[in-house]
Amino acid sequence: MAAYFRILRPVNLVIVTLTQGLLFFIIHSAYQHADVHPILDGPLITLFIICTLCLAASANVINDILDIDIDLHNNRKNIVGSLISRNQAYLYYSLITLVGLILAAYIGVRIGRPGLILIYPAVVAVLYLYSKSFKGTPLLGNIVVAAFCAFVPGILWYGELNALYLLKKQDLIGYEIITYLLSGFVIFSFMTNLVRELVKDIEDYPGDKIHGIKTYPVAYGITRARVFALFNMMMTLLIVVFWWYMGRDLYSGSRVHSLAIVPLIFPPLVIINHLTKIPDLIRVRLASYWLKVYMVIGLLILLILA
């Protein structure tokens, strides 16, 4: 039974839960000040988060199913084939996907957004294709994963559009702050995860090369992959600084906003330093570790500025 839990990658699911839970808290706090009723409220919030978790969990399961041989060469433990058979894993994947689809349909009908019913299977299909083939296409696989990570906060925007429109009419400043925070975090999620996926591909280079998985490092070499990861990390730093600068008017005179620039720029500088030392494997792992730290810092900054 423990194997069925571990294959879901619970740490990643906790991060998804915290991200959406925190964003719900921030959005609903703004609603309360403007006396706006949220679209997703009460049990619907829980069901919405579970629906997103089903997407993430099913993606983790299908990825492990299709990565058995590659993980073996990259010295990574794969539960499929050792603790869970391939057939059992496929059944597990199907059940999780079905539960998520039912929840998406229910939520879509309840809030009057049938588009959610179409979005769910579309995302499932893209994530399946990622594990099946996109992963072996230079950069495309990285973009798909980064886009899904941006989707986690972005889908809340879609679900709450009507309430956000009312917020704009009743409290323009509150609406602008929510838009500023949400848009910034969506872009932040995409960019940081894009760099992290590139770093992971560099780390997985030996196994990917043996199995003909044409990731960016396999197709163009580790040196070019390192340079590309460095470029994207520098772009992330510039975007974050620009985002912080654009918020000065919204937080005029706020010491908290002024000080927020320090934790926003320090980790990228550390990551850039480690990226310059690649292909040293220790540096690769340190860069990956600091990218995770930076993502957590991004969440905390979001909470502090809300």
Image (tube, rainbow, N blue to C red):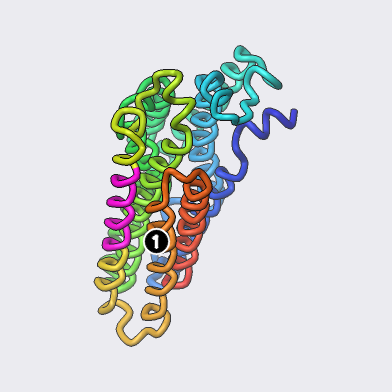
- Name the residue at the top extreme: 87
Q: Position of residue 136 (x, y in %)?
A: 36, 24
Above or below, 202 relative to 229: above
Q: Position of residue 169 (x, y in %)?
A: 26, 67
Residue 206 belongs to the span the image colors magenta: no
The amino acid pointed to by label 1 is: Pro
Q: Residue at (55%, 24%) from the top-left corner? A: 73
Q: Position of residue 140 (x, y in %)?
A: 30, 32
- Name the residue at the bottom extreme: 253
Q: Residue at (38%, 68%) from the top-left corner? A: 265
> 140 left or right of 42?
left
Q: Residue at (38%, 71%) from the top-left corner? A: 34
Q: Looking at this view, is 129 or 121 the one in front?
A: 129
Q: Which residues are magenta?
A: 226-239
Q: Residue at (48%, 40%) from the top-left corner? A: 52
Residue 41 visible within the image: no
Label 1 secondary element: helix
Q: Position of residue 112 (x, y in %)?
A: 36, 41
Above or below, 269 relative to 281: below
Magenta stretch: helix, strand or loop mostly: helix
> 7 left or right of 54?
right
Q: How many tags in the picture? A: 1
The quadrant of the rendering that contains the C terminus is bottom left
Residue at which label 1 appears: 268
Residue 238 belongs to the span the image colors magenta: yes
Residue 262 visible within the image: yes
> 129 left or right of 62?
left
Residue density around tag 1, few if under 14, some if 14–19, many if 20 or more, within 10 Å: many
The quadrant of the rendering that contains the N terminus is top right
